[in-house]
Image (cartoon, coloured by chain):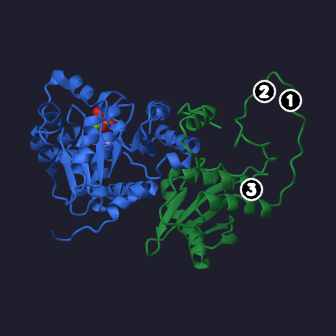
Amino acid sequence: MSPSLSWIDPGELKETLSRIGISVDGPPAPPPSFRPEPSEDQPSPPPTPNTEASPPPPHFEPVISVAERIDRFARWLEQLTHGAPMSIADPEGLLIEGRGLPEPLALASVALDRALRPIRGLLGTHQVGSVTLEIDGGRLVQTIWVVTPIGRVALGIMVERPLEPGRVELVREGLRRVFDW
Amino acid sequence: MFGLTIASQKGGVGKTTVALNLSYAMARRGWRTLLVDTDPAGAIGLSLTKKLSQAPGLADHLYQHTPIAGLIVETKLKGLGILPTGKIPADESERFTNGLADGAVLKAIQTAAQGRYDVVVYDTPSGFVGATLGAMRASRYVVSPVQAEPIAARGVMRIFEVIGALRAKGHPVELLGILLTMLHTKTQSSLAVAEDLWKTLPGNLLFEATVPRDPAFLEASAAGVPVGLLRRRPPPIAMVFDQLAAELEARLAPDAKDVANEPIALVD
Ligand SMILES: Nc1ncnc2c1ncn2[C@@H]1O[C@H](COP(=O)(O)OP(=O)(O)OP(=O)(O)O)[C@@H](O)[C@H]1O
Ligand SMILES: [Mg+2]
């Protein structure tokens, strides 16, 4: 994790907010990690190099099936996007998950990926990371790609407003973790 | 009727830009909005017209007790009024902001505007001093713009401290949200700051709307208009303030929302 640019200390923030009586919804939760569940309280403990205490005993990660990983990711995404319909396509363009996103839209998000190939070539980059397509009635389908160990995976979500860059990054991180084992 | 202060510790982060464009967006949504310039530099006047920057205003009320009603400048958008700073000699800035510090004069504007306006928006000088504290004391809500760059982000905690201190003294002011401004997604450090705040701050303290860095603001200030009036087809950036106004509205307490629910006359 990169160091905090804002220098905000989560503990101090929490303490300050509770002292002045500001109630807190909580930040968008970080994407689920498929590592062992953190023991509690701390949402995502920073990887502090622990020099004094002896190293923790080796922990054998429980094997979680891909289906289970996707399910956890989908539930997390649902919270982040307030239940936006979504689909996930594998590197072959086959749908591996669909929740509420009408199939034609899910397939459109795959077709978009194909259509972008020449554009990626033109730009000389594989980093065309997301595209927002306006359908009708103010509906947008936002397609976010992420390169995972199994190849490029595409997430399509239907939203009223595109997710902000920060959330897109969070989503990407979550999706990457799904296929990272 | 409620007061809404736009305030930040750091200068040049876009407070005046937000105050002006948000007021315009709120008025378009049907909130009768009075924009009050408490910056002795007269930032709102400078953003609009020479005439407005030379018009009598808050200073005349403060020193000569000129009634507020006669100092309000109606704009061409029905329901949007502006109370300019008024002429302040350069060496009087401190006296002017100190005169506003206890919040009494700024609160009295709300009383004077009762029935004509639903919201009083205060643009403030930077830093939590004089007029800014006065505006916060007179307001129910605060919106704090934070420029999407590292130094501004490092000062974010300050607003919580100030609000806490005011509340401890019995002022029921609430932070409606922190607003990221001048976000430049193509600059790594600007985006990194935004991501940092998105990850660190609770969702209810950070507006989803962000104000991108956009040359349209320079154009708009050169033309002396809110971005929404830059041309017949406003630049897309103007929509950010419509989004912000909608989001802001959703965050208001139910009783604050009620005020604007009276019928709005189509003709007088
Ligand atoms: N989103 C933006 N994109 C580009 N330029 C902007 C943006 N917002 C504001 N500006 C420009 O930056 C300058 C400072 O903005 P502004 O006056 O609104 O800041 P401020 O916080 O009110 O400053 P001060 O602390 O002096 O009162 C102005 O020239 C304004 O036109
Ligand atoms: Mg200003």
Which of marks 3 and 1 precedes in the sequence? Answer: 1
Labelled pair 3, 2 in contact (Cβ < 8 Å): no
- The disc at residue A55 is 1
- The disc at residue A179 is 3
Residue with the mark numbered 2: A50
Marks 1/2: CA–CA distance:
7 Å
**Is residue A144 depicted above or below B211 in this figure?**
below
Q: Image quadrant of residue B178?
A: top left
Chain A appears what colour? green
* Chain painted in blue in the figure: B
Q: Chain of mark 2?
A: A
Labelled pair 1, 2 in contact (Cβ < 8 Å): yes
Which of marks 2 and 1 precedes in the sequence? Answer: 2
Local secondary structure at mark 2: loop
The amino acid type found where label 1 is placed reads Pro
Q: Are marks 1 and 2 on the same chain?
A: yes
The amino acid type found where label 2 is placed reads Asn
In this orientation, which residue lies closer to the viewer: B206 or B36?
Answer: B36
How far from the left and from the top, in percent, is residue B10? 38, 31
- The residue positioned 62% from the left and 54% from the top of the image is A171
In this orientation, which residue lies closer to the viewer: B114 or A156?
Answer: B114
Which of marks 2 and 3 precedes in the sequence? Answer: 2
- The residue positioned 12% from the left and 33% from the top of the image is B87
Marks 3/2: CA–CA distance:
28 Å
A66 with respect to B173 (left or right):
right
Local secondary structure at mark 1: loop
Marks 1/3: CA–CA distance:
28 Å
